[in-house]
Amino acid sequence: MFPGSNCDRDANYSFEYLGAGTRYLWHQDTDLEGVDVVVLPGGFAYGDYLRTGAMAAYSPVMDSVREFAAAGKPVIGICNGFQVLCEAGLLPGALRRNSGLRFRCMPVRIRVETLDSPFTSGGMWPGQILTIPIAHFDGSYYADDETLEQLVADRRIAFRYCDAEGELTADSNPNGSRLHIAGILNEQRNVLGMMPHPERAVDPAVGGTDGRLILASVLYSLQPAET
Amino acid sequence: MRFAAHINVMPRAEISDPQGQTVERTLPAIGFEGISEVRVGKRITFTVEAPDEDAARRIAASASEKLLANPVIEDFELELSAL
């Protein structure tokens, strides 16, 4: 949690809903002892002053998150958390102002692009379409051509915005993201950044349950392998 | 010595600038003709204490690279003057 985070309780609720124990980490905390998964929630960290996520990327907790990620443990950045991970250099590229200059707040469809990550390995199939809400002004994913080619070659695009048939139509891209990118993985595939909010699609009381697949997948990945 | 630093941060040339495009579409509607290639950036100013101008420039450039501009999407220009 950073000053200005506002999806931390939703994230906490959704992981507890799925049976996980949770704890809040403040931006000045540096001790991640006993933590299995780090979630960077959505919101407006440090007011999103200067650029989204710019100041949060240098907060004390991020040094610990960097070490945690380097040790191969799973980190999920959702919405503002994705922006923070990009600013911190844990993921390539940047999130820019939506191409339509509108704050977009609605359910969108995203296509599962790879099963090769702790966030997409459990209970999903390639090409599966998930419906998950977005709520952002600065969600237009940008990276230069070379970086995009690398992401494609390494199959590090986790999710892409699509229509009901799974096609990458212009109308299905809510923010002008390059290659319709909704979520990407780092090189070691243990850090996921995504603009849609899976934690808002867990409890059926508040709409859809497709977000469960992603959060449950990462919890499942922590279980020791069956022998 | 104290120096005044002015940092102009602009979206990189090859990146589309939806804010600039929107401003550009609005200008003719309020009577301004002949204006094109509008781009919207930001200007950041501060003063910096340093032994000499080179040192001040290094500090300001480093701050710009590390925090004030994001090199993935932005370029910056640095202006420095002694106070």
Image: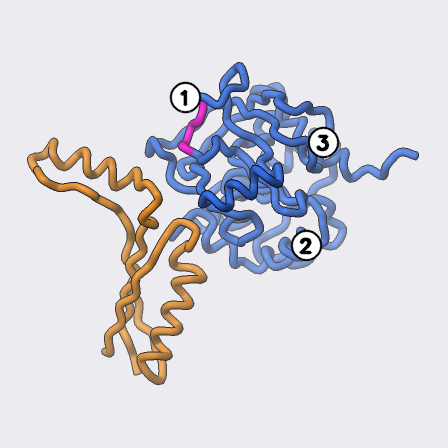
Chain colours: A blue, B orange
Kindly identify which residue carries mark 3: A121
Residue closest to the far top: A165
Residue found 43% across the figure and 37% down from its top: A140
Where is residue A187 drawn, in percent x and y? 63, 47
Q: What residue do we see at 39% from left, 73% from top?
A: B58
Q: Is residue A85 above or below residue A179?
A: below
Q: Give the camera-side residue of B41 and A165.
A: A165
Q: Are marks 3 and 1 on the same chain?
A: yes
Bounds of the magenta segment: A170-176
Q: Are marks 2 and 1 in contact (CB under 8 Å)?
A: no
Q: Residue at x 45, y 45 (%)?
A: A144
SS under mark 1: helix
Report the amino acid beneath label 1.
Asp
Relative side of B9 to A194, left or right: left
Q: Quick check: do tags 2 and 1 share a chain? A: yes
**Hey, what amino acid is under mark 2?**
Ala
Q: Which residue is mark 2?
A: A70
| Rendered position, A37 above or below B31 | below
Circle nearer the N terminus (3, 1): 3
Structural crowding at the residue carrying mark 2, measured as other residues with C-alpha within 10 Å and reported as few (<14), some (14–19) or many (≥20):
some
Query: Which labelled disc corresponds to residue A171?
Result: 1
